[in-house]
Image (cartoon, helix red, strand yellow):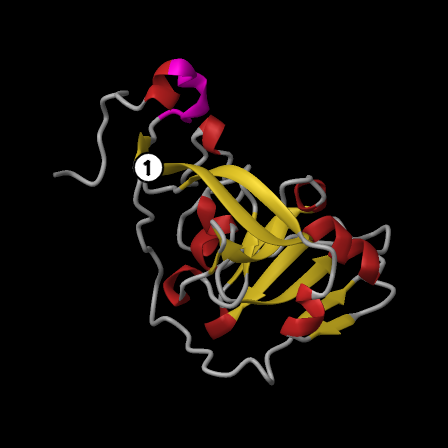
């Protein structure tokens, strides 16, 4: 049996064909795609999320401190640049907008850079970061993220191709000028809008 099917047999697609972006195929599975090894976090005692850059109040949060903040559930579909989509996910975490507000972003901050384990980065415009579905998340469908899907924390940006939802998140930096990340420097489109098929430069 193929992982993907290009036939719109799923009733959700049949009921609303505009739910599936152009060029995408639906899967019930969650394919694992990344470059390099999966980071290991056997103990979160020393783990911290740092919010830095053009902010009034730089923050350093332990995992427990982050989880003590008001949490949200984000129902969403996810769309990968490699053409698979997965419907009806529910992620749990903290609103990215709430974190930026707590840090007090300065007026000159126009982009957010996600800084992750092993030196990986990606960025999104500030207006995307402030969308109500943008978040940092630690659970998927009621269970902690699996290591290969970003445990203990990943970004969530459902309105962009899923590499913008960076795994193994360790830092959020508000910046004035955009910074191309690993995948963008290697040919991926920095805007990454799945509805416009902004896959590659």
The residues colored magenta run 15-22
Badge 1 element:
loop
- Position of 123 with respect to 35 (left or right) is right
**Residue at image location 59% in from the left, 84% down from the top:** 45
Q: Is residue 168 visible?
A: yes
Is 99 included in the stretch rendered in magenta? Answer: no
Regarding residue 191, the answer to whether it shows in the image is no
Say which quarter of the image contains residue 9.
top left
Where 4 sits versus 29, above or below?
above
Any magenta on residue 17? yes
x, y percent for residue 23: 33, 28
> Crowding near pointer 1: few (<14 within 10 Å), some, many (20+)?
some
In the image: residue 155, left or right of residue 163: right
| Residue at 28% over, 20% down | 8
Most distant residue in the front direction: 142
Give how far across and how far down residue 64 sits, in percent: 66, 73
Location of residue 147 with respect to 200 vertically, above or below: below
Classify residue 7 by image quadrant: top left
Residue 143 percent location from the top left of the image:
47, 58
Q: Which residue appears at 15% of the width and 38% of the height?
A: 2
**Residue, x 69% and y 50% (percent of image)?**
95
The correct choice, above or below, for 138 with respect to 197 in the image is below
The residue that label 1 is drawn on is 83
Instruction: Work out whether residue 187 or residue 1 is closer to the camera in this orientation and state it.
Output: 1
Q: Is 46 displayed left or right of 88 in the figure?
A: right
Quadrant housing the N terminus? top left
Quadrant location of residue 29?
top left
Residue 167: x %, y % from top left: 48, 61
For the C terminus, the quadrant is top left
């Amino acid at each position: 049996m193929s992982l993907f099917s290009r036939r719109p047999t799923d009733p959700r697609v049949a009921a609303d064909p505009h739910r599936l972006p152009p060029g995408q195929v639906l899967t019930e599975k969650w394919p694992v795609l990344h470059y390099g090894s999966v980071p290991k976090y056997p103990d979160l005692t020393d783990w911290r999320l740092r919010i830095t850059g053009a902010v009034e109040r730089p923050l350093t949060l332990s995992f427990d401190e982050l989880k003590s903040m008001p949490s949200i559930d984000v129902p969403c579909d996810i769309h990968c640049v490699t053409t698979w989509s997965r419907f009806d996910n529910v992620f749990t975490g903290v609103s990215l907008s709430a974190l930026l507000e707590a840090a007090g972003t300065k007026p000159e901050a126009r982009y957010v850079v996600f800084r992750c384990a092993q030196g990986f980065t990606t960025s999104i415009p500030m207006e995307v970061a402030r969308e109500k579905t943008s978040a940092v998340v630690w659970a998927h469908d009621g269970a902690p993220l699996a290591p290969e899907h970003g445990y203990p924390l990943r970004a969530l940006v459902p309105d962009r191709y899923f590499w913008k939802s960076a795994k193994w998140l360790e830092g959020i930096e508000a910046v004035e000028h955009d910074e191309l990340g690993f995948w963008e420097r290697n040919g991926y489109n920095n805007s990454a809008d799945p509805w416009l098929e902004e896959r590659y430069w």
